[in-house]
Image: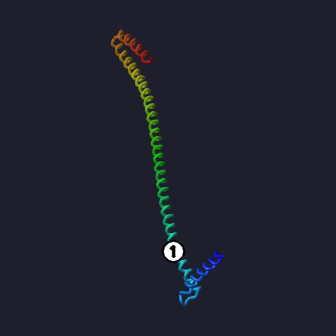
Amino acid sequence: MRRIVFLIVMCCLLLMGTSIYAQSTQGTTFSDWYRHQFHLLSNQLSEEMNISLTTFETSVNTYQEQLLKRMESRLVDYVLNASEDANHDIKNYKNNHLQQLNETKESLMEKDLIEIEKEMKKRQMEIDRRTFDILSELLSEYGFDGITSDVKLENNHNKTEGDN
C-alpha cells in the first residue's frame, strides 16, 4: 500500500511541477507555451542536424578527395608503366630489326664481294690470256717461238691452278 501511495504522490508532484511551469508564463495559454517549446526544441534539433550534416558532408568530401587522389596516382602509375613498357617493346623491336638489317647487309656484302672477286679473277685471266696472245703474236713475228711455248706452258699451268 505504501508503494501505491508513494506512486500517487510522485505523479501529483510531477504533474503539479509541469502545470506550475506552464502556468508561470502569464498571458499565454498552454498551447502557446507548448508551441513555443516545440519550436525551440525543433530549432535546436535542426541546428544540431545541420551541424551533423555539415560535418558528415565535410568528411565525405574529404574521403572523396583522398579516394580521387589515390585513384589518380594509381592511374598515373599505370599509364607511366604502360608507356614505359610500350617504349621498351618498341626499342626492342627496333633493335631487333636493325640487327636483322645489319646481318642481311653483311650477308649481301659478302656475296657481292665473293662475286666481285670471281669477276675480277675472271677478267684478270682474260687480260692475262689476251696479253699472252698479243705478246705471243709479237714475239712470233720477231722469231722468238721458244719463249712463247715456255710461257704457254706456264700460262696453262696457272689457269689450272686458278680453276681449282
Q: In which quarter of the image is the N terminus?
A: bottom right
Find residue 138 and report its horizontal and vertical position in percent.
Answer: 35, 16
Residue 78 picture location, percent across and down? 49, 51
Q: What residue type is labelled 1?
A: Glu
Q: In this view, does 59 lie above or below 9?
A: above
Label 1, residues with CA under 10 Å away: few <14, some 14-19, many ≥20: few
- The type of colouring in the image is rainbow
- From the viewer's perspective, is 118 left or right of 39? left
Q: Which of 155 and 23 is in front in this view?
A: 23
Q: Where is residue 10 in the image (x, y as percent from the top left)?
A: 60, 78
Q: 156 or 143, which lies in front? A: 156
Q: Is residue 53 above or below residue 99?
A: below
Apparent side of residue 18 relative to residue 76 in the rendered image (left or right): right
Looking at the image, the residue that sits furthest to the front is: 2
Q: Which of 31 and 121 is in front in this view?
A: 31
Give the residue displayed 43% in from the left and 24% down from the top: 118
Count of numbered circles in the view? 1
| Residue furthest out toward the top | 146
- Residue denoted by label 1: 47
Vertically, is 136 above or below 42? above
**Left or right of residue 94, residue 33 in this image:** right
Which residue is rendered at x = 37% and y = 17% of the image?
132
Question: Can you say whether 45 is above or below 134 in the image?
Answer: below
Q: Pinpoint residue 92: horizontal percent, then vertical percent.
A: 46, 41
Q: Which quarter of the rendered picture does the C terminus lie within?
A: top left
Residue placed farthest to the right in the image? 1
157 left or right, relative to 4? left
Q: In this view, which residue lies farthest toward the left? A: 142
Q: Which residue is drawn at 42% across and 23% down?
A: 122
| SS at mark 1 in the image | helix
